[in-house]
Amino acid sequence: MKKEQTRICELYDLNHTMAAEYLRQFTYPWEALAGLADFLRELGNTLDPEEYERRGEAIWIHREAHVYESAYLTGPLIVCRGAEIRHCAFIRGSALVGENAVVGNSTELKNVILFDGVQVPHYNYVGDSILGYKAHMGAGSITSNVKSDKLPVWVHAEDGEIETGRKKVGALVGDRVEVGCGSILNPGSVIGRDTSIYPLSSVRGCVDARSIYKREGEIAAKRQG
């Protein structure tokens, strides 16, 4: 994957998120992470109270969303129409949960945008990340958002590295990506649209769109069909 393929316009269809206008301000998706909390507060204050129930200072829940009583929610947070926040989900704030998205049992979110139709349904951790339209993370798969040496995260593209300027960057996951169970997306991973990640993978760097990631060094292009 080359640098230009890590751009927002290459990874995401912005017709499938309430954050479209916000994201259009940026070239690369990780640039949107720093101001996400402020954006959500501003957006929340514009939402129609007949559609969105306000809970506390900065939590807005669509009246057609389903939030289990056992879920723990911290703002700023917006949960869109048809979304489901399941038993014992833990949302630590700065999160946008798109329409018909699923945040499952014991899943933790922090500083994230989940596009419409995203599923993180079983024991997932998603932090400082953006997941595109209908992306799905299998049970136990996580985004790792801090390097072991605690140094700033770089994105490793085919034609050079891109400095993010942030110590915390998880994964930038394109539309319709399938992440297999038990996989780890390491800091600064970028996964192109329509790619599948095998279970128990440890992904570093960038993976081209429409690929099958089997293991490090073994990535196959999907057949056109």
Image: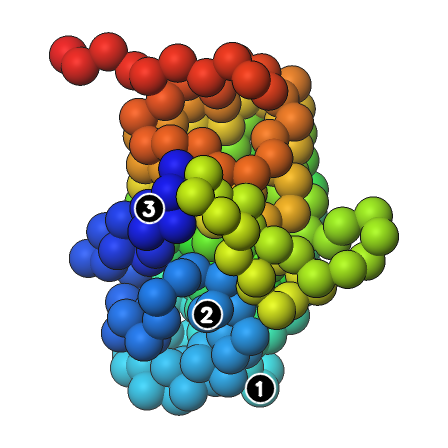
Q: CA distance from mark 2 to mark 1?
A: 23 Å
Q: Is residue 184 above or below residue 156?
A: above
Name the N-terminal-most of marks 2 and 3. 3
Tell me if 60 is positioned left or right of 63 in this view: right
Q: Is residue 117 above or below residue 66?
A: above
The residue that label 2 is drawn on is 32
Disc 2 crowd rating (10 Å Cα; few below 14, some 14-19, many 20+) is many
The local secondary structure at tag 1 comes to: loop
Name the N-terminal-most of marks 2 and 1. 2
Q: Could you say which disc has been placed on residue 5 in the image?
A: 3
The x, y position of residue 152, in whole percent, is: 70, 62
The x, y position of residue 147, in whole percent, is: 76, 50
Type of residue at label 3? Answer: Gln
For the point 65% across and 47% down, the residue is: 187
The residue that label 1 is drawn on is 57
The answer to which quarter of the image holds residue 51 is bottom left
Q: Is residue 167 above or below residue 118?
A: below
The local secondary structure at tag 2 comes to: helix
In the image, 40 versus 46, the foreground residue is: 40
